[in-house]
Structures are given as C-alpha cells and as structure tokens.
Amino acid sequence: MRILWVTNIKIPLISKLQGSTSTINVGGWLDRISKGVLRNKDNQLIICYPSLTEESAQIENLTYMSLLFDTAKMQEGTLNDEDGIKLAEKILSETKPDIIHIHGTEFQYHWFFAQAATNLKIQNRMVVSIQGLVGIYAKHYALGVPNKIISSFTFKELIKKNNIKKGIDNYIQRGKYEKRTIQLTPNIIGRTTWDRACTYRYNPLARYFVGNETLRENFYKGQWQCDSCVKNRIFISQAGYPVKGFHLFLDALLDIREFYPDVTVHVAGTDLTKSNWLKGSTYANYIQQKMKKYGLNKIITFCGSLNAEQMKKEMLEANVFVSPSTIENSPNSVGEAMLLGVPVVSSGVGGVMDLLKHGVEGFVYQSDAPYMLAYYVGRIFDDNNLAIRLGKAAHARANITHDYEKNLRELLEIYNEICEGNQE
C-alpha cells in the first residue's frame, strides 16, 4: 500500500535520518505511528511537511519531501491558491498514493491537497484526521481576556502586525480553508463527540471513523506516586497564548493560595515574565500584570521548552496536572498525565469530556469558572486517597484510549477499508 501523509511538522524520525542530534519536542506521537506503518515492508510511506528548506529523500520504504511555504502567509492563510494546488497535484501525480492521509485541517495547504485530489478524481483515497479546528477555536480564542488587551500591540507586534486580535483573524481566515477541506473529504478520522459534531456541520455525508491517538513513548512507562510528589505543586504544560487559558488559571490560583499558602506552580514553555512592551507580546504582558496584581510571582516557575522526558519528570513531581484551556479537542498533555496516573483537573471544553470521566478519572470544570478549578485542586491537595484513586483510574482509562498496537491496527484497518471501497 502506498500511503501519503501531509503533516504539519517534520517528524523526529526524519530529522534523525538527516543526521540531526538535537532534541525535538514535537511530533513524537506521529513518530511512533510512522514506525508502525513502516514495520510492514509492503507499505510505502510518503511524508510531506512544510519547511523553510528544500528536502527530499527515499530511505527503504520511507520517502519524505518538504513543502516550501512562506511561514507568515501560512499562519495568515494567505498562500497563493493556484500555486499551492499545482504543487499538490504534482506530488499526487508523481507519488500515486493509494491513501492520502491529511493530518489536520488547520492550514491552507491541507486544502491544497484536498482540492488537488478532487481535481485528479482520486478524492475517494483521501482521509482527514481532525486535530484542532481553528475555525471553531476562533470563537473561544480569547475567552476572559479584556477587549482592551485583545486590541493592544507591543512595539514588536505593531511592526509584525500580529497581536491577539490578529491571531483570532488568522484562525478565522484559515478556518475558511479548513471548512473547504472537510467538505471535500469523503473520510474523516476523529475521536471525540466535539470533533464529530463540528465536522458533521460541514460535511454530514462523510464517513466518520474513530481513531484514537498514540502518545509519546516516554509516557507509557513510570507511575505517579503520591508519597514522592511535591506536595501542593501544580503543573501546566502550556501558557504562551490565550487558548491555553493561563490568564483564567491565575484567577483560580489566587483562591488556591488563600487556603494553601505553600502552593507552587511549574509551567512548561517560554518565560512570560521576560516579555516587555518593546520586544514581547501583549498577552505575556497581561499575564505579568495579573501575576503582579495578585502577588503570584514568587510561586510560579516557568520551566522553558521541555522535551518528553523533562515533561514527564515535571508531571511525576506535581501533586496535580491542570489544563485550563478555553478550547481543545483531545489535549495530548491530558492524555500523557493520565497515562502516568497524575491527578488531572481540566476545563470541560471541546472533547475533554470524552477523555476522562468527571469525579472518577479526574475533575472537569466549566472553563470560565476558575473558582471551580480552585475547588477541585483543593480536594486533591486535601485528600491523598482521592488523588491516588483518581490517578489509578485515569491510568487504566488512558492505557485503553492510547494503546499503541490497537490504535495502529485500527488505523491500518481504516486504510484497508478505504482501499477496498475504491476497488468496488
């Protein structure tokens, strides 16, 4: 079977084949699935991904090739349609795939391949995996951020014409292409009620396959231990832009500190306290203002970019993992925490309710009700037996949801079903 993937990143496997020794912090879940597909030497896997440099090679049954796109235009959804479709048609004509698997819908080039497949009358070979849905995310992008902050600029943002409002506009623009992509595909892979509902609005006639995600290999080993965690420490995996809801978390943290003065917070990613009005971002400056106003600076540590093993270490040391996002589909970070058996408190947005059962495998709260987040974190801080019980149940659930061999087998079954349908 010849399988063409369109991905948003160069997966770590390709970087290693190119001789890179640097640690890559994204794409680990795609890496594992690609290795499973390549395990069968009868499968030919072709991977296309955006890059700033021209790259292509064939190594055994793997072929990879880069897509040269202007990064700024890609983020804005303003790439040239005609050129993009021609490039996709050329790739599809030369590679002759049996399956065209488009991983995600968030960028314009996903539509290029969907339209090219339609033009070449091979659209029945196409399947689209839903990751996030930017057109829907735009509606929730800046929940709880004051309008004044949304429309403000730092000097850097003014020069680059890229502030929070522009981020929302970019999502809306890219969402137009996302809708077209979904409307063109006859096959959709999703995993939550939320992505099923959203894609059904765009294309009620598409076949919907359930395909759960495999997570990074590191998180399948190791188990959270209540006795060895840092008591009253919270870990958060992302905070860099409004969708991740860190501004709402700070409101909850103010309440938490009132009852637990020794609470500490570790946050993965860029140190938002280093931002300023000259070189930083409006959102980071807003976070700084809230932290200063609430007197939270001394209890929050920004850990920088973390690889999988470092992220795992932070999760295992935490008393609770918190995901305060304003919108998600099925956040991998929640799945990773569950795999490790870390007690989880998550906003009940998007498809989160399909990941964990409230009160049994973690706690889920209304995203704009930070006082409920504070309450659930406090329950975990107060009750070690509850924390252990939640963690064990989450671990058992995640082992089913993210079972590598099962998910690989089901993906290949989807491919086979699509191919068999094309032969009828």
Image (tube, rainbow, N blue to C red):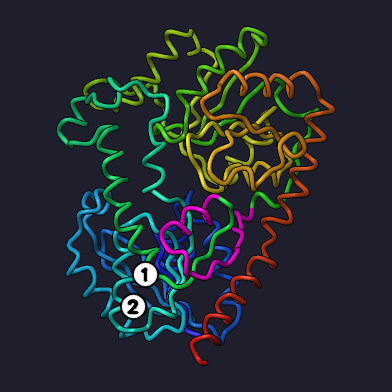
> Which amino acid type corresponds to the residue marked 2 in the rendered image?
Ala
CA distance for labels 2 and 1: 9 Å
Label 2 packing within 10 angstroms: few (<14), some (14-19), many (20+): many
Q: Position of residue 306 (x, y in %)?
A: 51, 40
Q: Nearer the viewer, residue 160 or 348?
A: 348
Up/down of 171 relative to 31, above or below: above
Q: Which residues are magenta?
A: 194-217
Residue lying at 24% horizontally and 64% vertically, measured from the top left: 68
Left or right: where 141 falls relative to 112:
right
Q: Are marks 2 and 1 in contact (CB under 8 Å)?
A: yes
Residue lying at 74% horizontally and 24% vertically, measured from the top left: 380
Q: Position of residue 54 (x, y in %)?
A: 26, 67
- Residue with the mark numbered 1: 184
Left or right: where 84 falls relative to 47:
left
Q: Nearer the viewer, residue 17 or 334?
A: 334
- Report which quarter residue 412 is drawn in: bottom right
Left or right: where 34 falls relative to 320:
left
Q: Residue furthest bottom?
A: 424
Disc ID at residue 117: 2
> Which amino acid type corresponds to the residue marked 1 in the rendered image?
Leu
Up/down of 5 relative to 278, above or below: below
Residue lying at 41% horizontally and 63% vertically, measured from the top left: 7
Q: Position of residue 369 (x, y in %)?
A: 55, 23
- Report which quarter residue 202 is drawn in: bottom left
Label 1 packing within 10 angstroms: few (<14), some (14-19), many (20+): many
